[in-house]
Amino acid sequence: MKKELATLGGGCFWCLEAVFTRFKGIIKVVSGYAGGRIPNPNYERVCTGSSGYAEVVQISFDADVMSYEQLLGIFFTIHDPTTLNRQGHDIGTQYRSVIFYKDDAEKTKAEEAIKQSEASGRWHGKYVTELAKFEKFWPAEQYHQGYYE
């Protein structure tokens, strides 16, 4: 098994977690926060929209079963990457579309995935998905984990 991690934000973390857990090759999905400025974020602070954090999922996956590119393909299918700082009724910077990359290779793969998905015409409009260097993932409170289930 070749275990890798991906950290993605595309609206409410509950919705992303609920979908990603159903795919072969996914080992674990943890809801949490990334991209912010304060240590030890919590749901209440993140919901203000002023912490800089996005609601994200950190996905452990077996790269021998599912590639990073396939994971990004799913990501661009399950959320609207053309809406700035919102998904449906969820509005605020914490709901932004964002890919946190670990290195230049992942950044390049993410850029290519954006181009391919945008060219597919699945979503109408210009993609606003942010690419940000991964720094730290903070797991959300326990009551957020497996929430959809």
Image: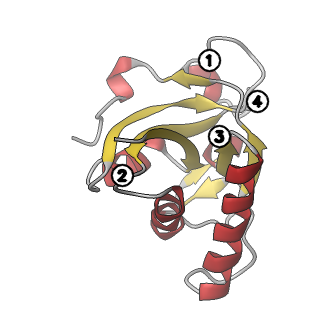
What residue would you read off at disc 4? Answer: 50
Distance, label 2 to label 4, CA atoms, is 28 Å
Q: From this viewpoint, is residue 82 visible?
A: no
Amino acid under disc 2: Phe
Task: First in sequence, mark 3 or 1: give its number.
Answer: 1
What residue would you read off at disc 1? Answer: 41
Mark nearest the camera among 2 and 1 is 2
Picture disc at residue 94: 3
* Position of residue 138 measured from the top left corner of the image (x, y, whole percent): 56, 21
Distance, label 4 to label 3, CA atoms, is 9 Å
Mark 3 lies on a secondary structure that is helix
Mark 2 lies on a secondary structure that is helix
| Label 2–label 1 contact, CB within 8 A | no
Determine the residue positioned at 43% across, 19% down. 141
Amino acid under disc 4: Ser
Mark nearest the camera among 3 and 2 is 2
- Report the front residue among 83 and 7: 7
Determine the residue positioned at 67% across, 86% down. 119
Task: First in sequence, mark 1 or 4: give its number.
Answer: 1
